[in-house]
Image (cartoon, rainbow, N blue to C red):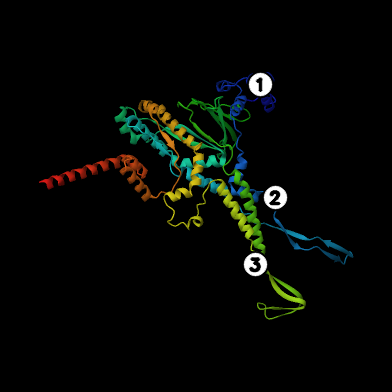
Amino acid sequence: MSTWKDIKAERPNRNIQPLKKYCRVKSLEGILALEDIGIKIQYLKKGRRTNLPDCAELWNDWNPERHEIITNKKKYPDRKVLKSEAKSIFDEKTGKTIEVPAEYETEEVNRITIPLEQDIVNIQTAFTVGTEPKMDCSTEDEDEKSLLAALKSTLQKNKIKYQNKKVVRSWLSEQEVAEYWYVVDADSFWDKFWAGIKKTFGGKTKPSKKLKSVLWSPFRGDKLYPFFDDNGNMVAFSREYKKKDLDDNEITCFMTITQDMVYQWEVGKEWGQPEGKTFNHGFHKLPVIYAYRPEAYCKKVKTFRVRLEKLLSNYADCIDYHFFPILQLVGDVEGFAGKVKDRIVKLTGEGAGASYLTWNQVPTTVEFEAKTLINNAYDMTNTPRISFENLKGSGNALSGVAFRFVFMGAHMAVENHAEVIGDFMQRRTNFLVSALGAINPYEFDKASKTIDIDVELVPYMIDDLSDKVTTAVSAVAGGIWSTREGIMFAGNAERLDEELKEIQEEQAAKSTQISKKEQESEE
């Protein structure tokens, strides 16, 4: 918490005594009760226990057009090329010799950028949530089944399958991301559930609200301020952002969400609170899910990328100047023979002759360094290089278990990501269960307090279906798996109940046929 001297330095026009009184405020309730909005916002910002990410630096690393090989022309200057040499000209009118300086022109050098951070982050994102996280909920309770169906529909309607990729990508590249949930009119959202809900719960009024979400992150123009209590629990969350009014004037906005309220302030010359911007969000839990990492995922390989861009750019300049051979003529030119296209130069004198200037050494050192830098960048981040060039030699040799060994590094990285992202997904699920019970208390309140859903990240893998089916059949036949577990392992979990019912019907039909044949044979 800041001292009164810190706030006095930020707002020198304030009196000291009120500032001393403000600085005694420590609780969130005390901060929100302060009358001075500016001081209140300063306190809410101080609740953050980590440094704000340097958005400009992160964006410069992420966007190839902002790499220093492009923007820092002081460090990587363009080349000056001699256009005409210095010479002396005699002026007959004045009888003086005029010195004409050499004339140069600027020639752009090659500036090759490599989106290394983007490629590594995108591959890590695909391995982490390319396969949707698994939700494990073992229940036979009809109330909980209806709630689980509503939860899955909420995730589907909010396109969470794709939003998960945005979450992980932002977390890896921007260091932090927040997901905010709010209530809107349902439209036709509950139509497909209403018949089942009415039958199960005896509901008389169709729900009129549904849940929506939005992402906040530094690249989206947001400054995020989580507020933690002394136990490390996030009890409030604030967001600072800018918007423009109808007159194209920029307005700074500050939004704070607590366990039960949403507060919003806007600043022109002074902070103010617009009408209708403070309201009760209606949830039992804080409707913000937040993920943070202390540094960008690719920060440790930035030096490799900077060196690689410099190396390739300089090598491209070298090729431009030396790719085509240069003809070297030695001796005195005596004359020319032949036509223009077939002209022959006659050289005389000691050592007269002609030769092409060529490289005596193949630039293997450049190739070696470039490969070393690229390999180290991907190896240090446990990122597989998935390209046609790297995989074309594998053919059909890699499958099933072999593929899992090849991508073991990537799967280990996903396990590390799960410390934060897995927790993020679990807290999202817990919140949505509570939120569905809050906006539809008659239908889901009881089930929301008893249902237990575990969320687990499933690393992306190219599955060998024949291997999975063989494993499932062996496990079920050996009695160590149930038929239900075998079907789920084979990847047919979406039709689990239908498949079990059909299998039972087929087994019953086979048993009936066998019984008939046995009776006929006895007769």
Location of residue 223 (image quadrant): top right
Mark 1 residue crowding within 10 angstroms, few (<14) / some (14–19) / many (20+): some
Task: Say left or right for 278 vs 12.
Answer: left
Determine whether label 2 and label 1 are within 8 Å by CB: no
Residue 315 % position (x, y) = 64, 58
Reading the image, the residue beneath label 3 is: 324
Residue 284 % position (x, y) = 45, 26
Residue 283 % position (x, y) = 45, 27
- Secondary structure of the residue carrying tag 2 is loop
Point out the tag, 3 or 1, that comes first from the N-terminus: 1
* Image: 62 above or below 432: below
* Nearer-the-camera pick, 152 or 256: 152
Residue drawn at (63%, 29%) of the image: 269
- The amino acid pointed to by label 2 is Lys
Reading the image, the residue beneath label 1 is: 19
Q: Is residue 167 visible?
A: no
Q: Residue furthest left?
A: 523
Viewer-side label of 2, 1: 2
- The amino acid pointed to by label 1 is Leu
The N terminus: image quadrant: top right
* Nearer-the-camera pick, 266 or 438: 438
Q: Residue furthest front?
A: 478
Q: Is residue 354 visible?
A: yes
Reading the image, the residue beneath label 2 is: 75
* Image: 223 above or below 351: above
Point out the tag, 2 or 1, that comes first from the N-terminus: 1
Estimate the spatial distance between the alpha carbons at disc 2 and disc 3, rounded to whole Å. 28 Å
* Nearer-the-camera pick, 297 or 472: 472
* Image: 177 above or below 315: above
Estimate the spatial distance between the alpha carbons at disc 3 and disc 1, rounded to whole Å. 74 Å
- Secondary structure of the residue carrying tag 3 is loop
Residue 12 % position (x, y) = 70, 26
